[in-house]
Image (cartoon, grey):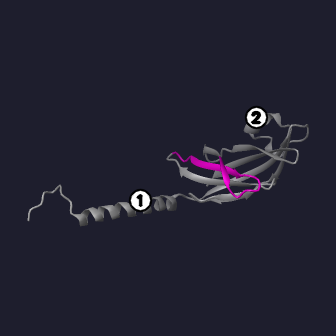
């Protein structure tokens, strides 16, 4: 029995479909497995507009000397948590105002930059609202601010590295 080469049997179609499904399930897992863990150094700062002191460890951080952060004349480091980020896994950090910061590496770009999602949960809720998506270079800090705390504003700096 001669069949044209363009005709696929049901078994062949099923085999190709199964192969496609397996590749679709395995490929993301392989990419995630090949993505190295990334260290995130976080600094939680209580910033106030009233005159005061700026923590000496923050004096050389250029981003904190430019708008909108340059309106703060008092900056106190509250904590410096360090977490290891795994591809497509959330890392949570407790904030002093009772909320939780969530960081997730979404993608490592070919040039080494990281696409990261940062969110903070709502008060008295377990859900996390999307807050920010950043394309960050390793070693360059980015900042999230706006959470009220103790008469000031929490400024959260995140520096990613390997």
| Residue 143 location (% of width, % of height) | 71, 43
Q: Residue 63's image quarter? A: top right
Residue highlighted by disc 2: 68
Q: Which element is circle 1 on?
A: helix
Which mark sits nearer the N-terminus, 2 or 1?
Answer: 1
| Residue 117 location (% of width, % of height) | 62, 49
Q: Is residue 58 above or below residue 161?
A: above
Which residue is rendered at x = 79% and y = 44% of the image? 58
Left/right of residue 121 with respect to residue 90 in the rendered view: right
Q: Which element is circle 2 on?
A: loop
- Outermost residue on the front side: it is 125
**Does residue 122 show up magenta in the picture?**
yes
**Front-lying residue, 21 or 117:** 21
Q: How would you rate the neighbour count of disc 2 (Cα within 10 Å): few for under 14, some for 14-19, many for 20 or more?
A: few
The answer to whether residue 136 shows anywhere in this view is: no
| Residue 120 location (% of width, % of height) | 70, 51
Residue mark closest to the camera, 2 vs 1: 1
| Residue 150 location (% of width, % of height) | 87, 48
Which residue is rendered at x = 62% and y = 48% of the image? 138
Q: Is residue 142 above or below residue 8?
A: above
Q: CA distance from mark 2 to mark 1?
A: 44 Å
Numbered mark located on residue 14 in the image? none
Q: Residue 99's image quarter? A: bottom right
Which residue is rendered at x = 12% and y = 60% of the image? 3
Q: Quadrant of the C terminus?
A: bottom right
Residue highlighted by disc 1: 24
State the extent of the magenta-drawn residues as a range.
111-130
């Amino acid at each position: 029995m001669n069949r044209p080469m363009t005709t696929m049997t049901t078994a062949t179609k099923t085999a190709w479909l199964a192969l496609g499904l397996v590749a679709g399930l395995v490929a993301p897992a392989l990419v995630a497995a090949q993505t190295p863990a990334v260290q995130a150094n976080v600094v939680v700062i209580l910033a106030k507009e009233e005159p005061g002191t700026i923590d000496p460890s923050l004096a050389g951080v250029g981003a904190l000397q430019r708008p909108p952060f340059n309106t703060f004349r008092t900056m106190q480091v509250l904590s410096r948590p360090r977490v290891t980020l795994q591809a497509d896994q959330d890392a949570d950090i407790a904030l002093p105002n009772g909320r939780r910061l969530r960081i997730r590496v979404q993608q490592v770009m070919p040039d080494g930059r990281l696409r990261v999602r940062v969110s903070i949960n709502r008060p008295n809720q377990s859900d996390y609202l999307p807050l920010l998506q950043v394309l960050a270079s390793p070693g360059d800090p980015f900042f999230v601010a706006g959470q009220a705390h103790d008469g000031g504003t929490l400024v959260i700096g995140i520096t990613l590295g390997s």
